[in-house]
Image (cartoon, rainbow, N blue to C red):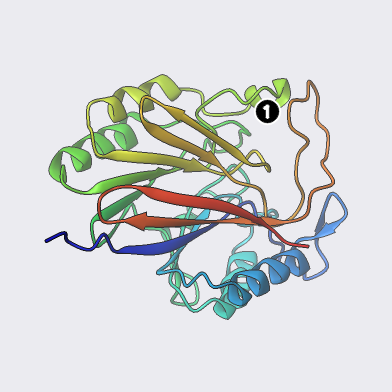
Amino acid sequence: MTMANSSFTVVQITDMHYFADSNGTLFDVNTAASLDRVIASINASRVEPEFILATGDLVHDEGAPAYERLARDLDALSAPIYGLAGNHDMAGAVSGRYNGRLTFPFRVQHRAWQFFLLNTQIDGEVGGRLSAQQLGDLNKALAAHPGQHTIVCLHHQPVKIGSHWLDGIGLENPNELFTVIGRFTNVRAVIWGHIHQEWDEIRAGVRLLGSPSTCAQFLPKQEHFALDTKPPGWRWLRLFDDGTLETEVVWVD
């Protein structure tokens, strides 16, 4: 008799670049209105996420009022929301709890899966880095939970994506991250934001996934900064008890 390979779904949203002012724009995109479209798309889909992963650059003007306003707007999503810091996020703000629902944990465990939300923020810098403490905490936690399928979440991309300007502001120490991950056989994926575009590759059996912003997108494979004409996007991940995953980016018309 075969056991059923049941599953659950999570959603990733990233790079909301929210402002305290509802009229705030990034590259002429009203980020609040754009996020409202993404939320409506999630709610209208058949995806019923257990929780939402918000992978950095939650706000753009680095003020606590922007987080409070973002958390209120995210109430339109019924699932819990777990966030992590991006380069635009306010240092220290991500240790708080907003509106009771937007929180910033290190580890989230659900059924056969666990998620680690790492802080790659360097205060005052656009690029990112994982501290020795973050890497040590990840190593220790992976060793403590070897039977849990794992997704590592961060803001800055840990791989070169072929855009010279973006590759210069990614994660400064990706080899240290992959060294830790390589010690374990239960890491299934690494997901991130920051690049404002879709990315999907496999490295040593680990799925590497970058996701588009809920507002403006960057044109892939560019030497210098350039905007894409693609609409806002979000990603769903369907996670099975046997460690397999299915995922897709949804572009919001």
Q: Is residue 64 above or below residue 69?
A: above
Q: Is residue 208 left or right of residue 193?
A: left
Residue depicted at 52% across the width and 28% down the height: 171
Q: Nearer the viewer, residue 227 or 171?
A: 227
Measuring from the top left, give residue 14's x and y in whole percent: 59, 53
Residue depicted at 69% across the width and 61% down the height: 18
Residue depicted at 45% across the width and 69% down the height: 49
Total count of labels = 1
Dot 1 lies on which element? helix
Q: Is residue 92 left or right of residue 216?
A: left
Measuring from the top left, give residue 252's x and y in whole percent: 73, 61
Which quadrant holds the C terminus? bottom right
Residue farthest to the front, as pictured: 1
Which quadrant holds the N terminus? bottom left
Measuring from the top left, give residue 216's x and y in whole percent: 77, 50
Q: Residue type at mark 1: give it.
A: Leu
Q: Residues within 10 Å of mark 1 (few under 14, many from 20)?
A: many
Q: Badge 1 is on which residue? A: 166
Q: Is residue 2 above or below residue 135?
A: below
Measuring from the top left, give residue 176's x and y in whole percent: 36, 22
Q: Nearer the viewer, residue 195 or 71?
A: 195
Q: Is residue 13 left or right of residue 207?
A: right
Q: Nearer the viewer, residue 78 or 49?
A: 49
Residue depicted at 21% across the width and 43% down the height: 141
Name the quadrant containing residue 118: top left
